[in-house]
Image (cartoon, grey):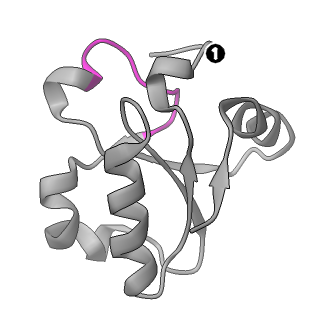
Amino acid sequence: MKTMTVKEVQDYMNTNKEVSIIDVREAEEVKAGKIPGAVNIPLGLLEFRLQDIDKSKEHIMVCRSGGRSGMASELLESRGYKVVNMEGGMLDWDGPTE
């Protein structure tokens, strides 16, 4: 599984305007703040929302600490999606939130 640090994700976002970020936390967790532009698809619903995820793009997976996004990355990878897990999750995120 491919991974990126929070710093690498922030740098990537600064140089690429078309970044796809999927936040797999529960809706209640996301209310506290998410990375601007991130789409919330809770881990438990991911399998049912595959049609909403563009298979031609690479997606950065995010959760609270990196565990659930790692599981989401494995699931999507096994289905042929290009994904990267953000290590450390929102606990390590010090960038802007919405």
Residue 76 lies, in percent from the top left, at 39, 74
User: Looking at the picture, does residue 4 appear above or below residue 47?
Assistant: above
Residue 29 lies, in percent from the top left, at 22, 22
Residue that protrudes farthest toward the right in the picture: 15
Q: Nearer the viewer, residue 87 or 43?
A: 87
Crowding around mark 1 (Cα neighbors within 10 Å: few <14, some 14 to 19, many 20+) is few
Location of residue 23 (image quadrant): top left
User: Looking at the picture, does residue 87 appear above or below residue 45?
Assistant: above
Give the residue at x 14% y 58%.
45
Q: Nearer the viewer, residue 41 or 3?
A: 3
**Which quadrant is home to the C terminus?**
top left
Residue 80 lies, in percent from the top left, at 47, 87
Residue 95 lies, in percent from the top left, at 64, 15
The amino acid marked with disc number 1 is: Gly
State yes or no: residue 10 in magenta: no
**Which quadrant is home to the N terminus?**
bottom right
User: Looking at the picture, does residue 30 appear above or below residue 80?
Assistant: above
Give the residue at x 50% y 15%.
97
Location of residue 32 (image quadrant): top left
Magenta highlight range: 30-38
Q: Which residue is mark 1?
A: 95
